[in-house]
Amino acid sequence: MSEARDIVEHLIEEGTAARAHFQVWWVLRNVAVPRLLSAMDHPAYVDFFHASNSGHYKLFFIALSKIFDRDDRVAGISELKKALRAEGRTDLALYIASELKPIEQLVVRIMRIRNKSIAHTERRIPRTRVYKINGITPNQIRQVIDQVCSVINHVARDLGISNTIFQSARLEEATLRMLETLRRGIVDY
């Protein structure tokens, strides 16, 4: 297996994680409230949803930071571009650079949040201030996830990898179905 293929397979895993964790978090924090809040606040489930919300939030930031990590020991986008060039696929390396250029500043903000609040907690700056300073919205985070997943999938298919990152809202839909089921069970409880 080529180094580029190996890196892409790692990126598919992280892209899948970023999209999945973001979608679950999005439903728990935005879509389900207030309609399904009773299911999440039920004493039998409330602790799970507190942990789940926090965990999914941190995990999509971590997955994105792994994708955009510039360390040469990490299977990130920058190492993928190097591997593609080394394997004579400069066309794909240029495609990646071109397609990710429009979200570059959003990626910088995501990495700052990850560095100041998710992976490391800077005690002099409260978490809420970290987000305000970096000025990024959930829709912009979704934009970054969608764009980078699209790029990874394009490169994967070009390299003959068919098992790529899902492109639907299936984790949002599954989370909503689960919450609806819990809510109905509480009524029948």
Image: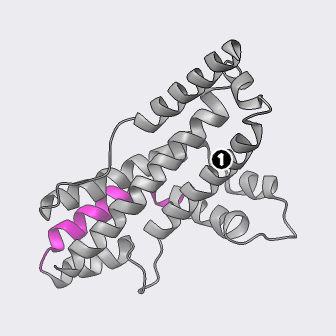
In the foreground, 58 or 38: 38
- Is 96 magenta? The answer is yes
**Which residue bears the numbered disc 1?**
52
Query: What residue do we see at 49% from left, 44% from top?
Result: 142
Q: Is residue 181 visible?
A: yes
Q: What count of labels does the image hold?
A: 1
Residue 177 x/y as whole percent: 51, 25
Q: Is residue 67 above or below residue 166?
A: below
Q: Is residue 56 above or below residue 64?
A: above
In the foreground, 105 or 179: 179
Is residue 31 left or right of 48 when viewed as pictured?
A: left
Query: What residue do we see at 40% from left, 53% from top?
Result: 16
Is residue 4 left or right of 122 when viewed as pictured?
A: left
> Which residues lie in the magenta part?
88-105
Query: What residue do we see at 26% from left, 75% from top?
Result: 6
Q: Quadrant of the N terminus?
A: bottom left
Instruction: Kindly give the residue lying farthest to the right in the view shown.
Output: 124
- The amino acid type, in three-letter code, at marker 1 is Ser
